[in-house]
Image (tube, rainbow, N blue to C red):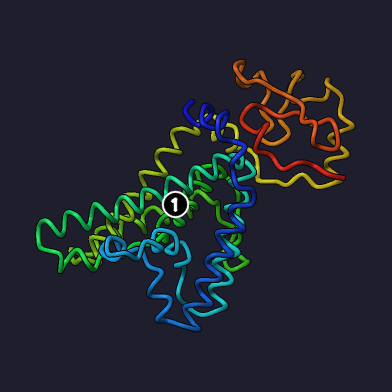
């Protein structure tokens, strides 16, 4: 798989705890928006201004987050962090990095293509108003989460239990609704392109991760706590799932699930922990 090959070469450069960094960037952006709206306007991804010297916008647009009241922002950021951390735990740090990186690059490419097409068709007066951010990329993170954990239940308003897959369908329908209702103004076209770029990124990873999804659909996101770590260390080979000889400590796949999987023990973890090739270099090391 193309992700495996990339991970073998570049896995060591993956950024750990990327969901935390993403949330912190949005938090900084929210503070700037409330303290200095004029400065905040200099952060947006605007291809016209980038081509006229404001190249920092290629990076600072990552600070553009939900613009609303503080309580709602805190809720949204905690939600982003929760689903991002769960995906990083299951996919591995490198794959989560790649999902977000490709999504960001797709947004940038989409912005410049939109600018070029509008400028060619209607003149620079139209192209100059193209602006994009990562809002729809973040929405597809929930689609990815729902595809991994469709049977997980959450409590709506802390009362009504509902499976994540139904929320995922609502998320997808909302994106489709926004796409068709956004109109054909410059802002509307920018929204359409942002949604298409985000969904293409989701579909790319959706089909690339089918093996992990097949296994991940039946287990819940989890963090290896100290008590669980000691319990896992105490296991013997005969206690592994279905009598397998090898079992990944992250995704719990065995050689019975995929004969082509390779397994290795991690020398940096405190304990006898074994990982598959997909998580050997990207898991969080267990420390006592």
Residue 89, position as x, y percentages in the image: 64, 44
Between 129 and 137, the one lying in front of the other is 129
Q: Quadrant of residue 203?
A: top left
Q: Residues within 10 Å of mark 1 (few under 14, many from 20)?
A: many
At horizontal 83% and vertical 44% (from top left) the residue drawn is 287
Between 119 and 220, the one lying in front of the other is 119
Quarter holding the C terminus? top right
Residue 21, position as x, y percentages in the image: 59, 58
Report the residue marked by disc 1: 140
Residue 210 located left or right of residue 283:
left
Residue 198 located left or right of residue 285:
left
Q: Quadrant of residue 48?
A: bottom left
Residue 18 located left or right of residue 127:
right
- Farthest residue in the top direction? 259
**Up-down relation of residue 265 to residue 105 (above or below):** above
- Farthest residue in the front direction? 53
Total marks shown come to: 1
Element carrying mark 1: helix
Residue 188 located left or right of residue 2:
left
Residue 59, position as x, y percentages in the image: 44, 59
Between 52 and 254, the one lying in front of the other is 52
At horizontal 59% and vertical 41% (from top left) the residue drawn is 13
Between 136 and 61, the one lying in front of the other is 61
**Up-down relation of residue 278 to residue 31 (above or below):** above
Residue 43, position as x, y percentages in the image: 41, 69
At horizontal 66% and vertical 18% (from top left) the residue drawn is 256
């Amino acid at each position: 798989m193309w992700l495996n090959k990339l991970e073998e070469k570049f896995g060591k450069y993956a950024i750990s705890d990327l969901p935390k960094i993403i949330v912190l960037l949005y938090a900084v952006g929210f503070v700037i928006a409330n303290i200095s709206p004029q400065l905040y306007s200099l952060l947006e991804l605007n291809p016209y201004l980038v081509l006229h010297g404001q190249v920092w916008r290629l990076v600072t647009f990552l600070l553009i987050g939900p613009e609303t009241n503080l309580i709602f922002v805190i809720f949204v950021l905690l939600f982003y962090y929760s689903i991002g951390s769960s995906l990083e735990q299951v996919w591995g740090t490198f794959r989560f990095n790649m999902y977000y990186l490709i999504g960001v690059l797709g947004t940038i490419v989409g912005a410049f293509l939109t600018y070029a097409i509008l400028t060619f068709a209607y003149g620079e007066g139209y192209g100059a108003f193209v602006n994009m951010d990562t809002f729809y990329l973040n929405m597809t993170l929930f689609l990815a989460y729902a595809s991994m954990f469709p049977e997980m239940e959450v409590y709506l308003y802390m009362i009504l239990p509902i499976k994540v897959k139904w929320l995922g369908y609502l998320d997808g329908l909302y994106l489709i609704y926004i796409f068709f209702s956004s109109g054909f103004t410059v802002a509307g076209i920018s929204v359409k392109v942002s949604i298409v770029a985000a969904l293409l990124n989701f579909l790319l990873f959706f089909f690339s991760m089918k093996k992990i999804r097949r296994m991940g659909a039946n287990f819940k996101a989890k963090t290896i706590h100290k008590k669980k770590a000691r319990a896992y260390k105490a296991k013997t080979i005969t206690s592994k799932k279905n009598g397998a000889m090898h079992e990944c400590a992250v995704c719990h796949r065995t050689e019975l699930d995929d004969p082509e999987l390779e397994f290795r023990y991690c020398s940096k973890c405190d304990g006898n922990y074994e990982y598959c090739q997909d998580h050997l270099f990207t898991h969080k090391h267990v420390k006592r």
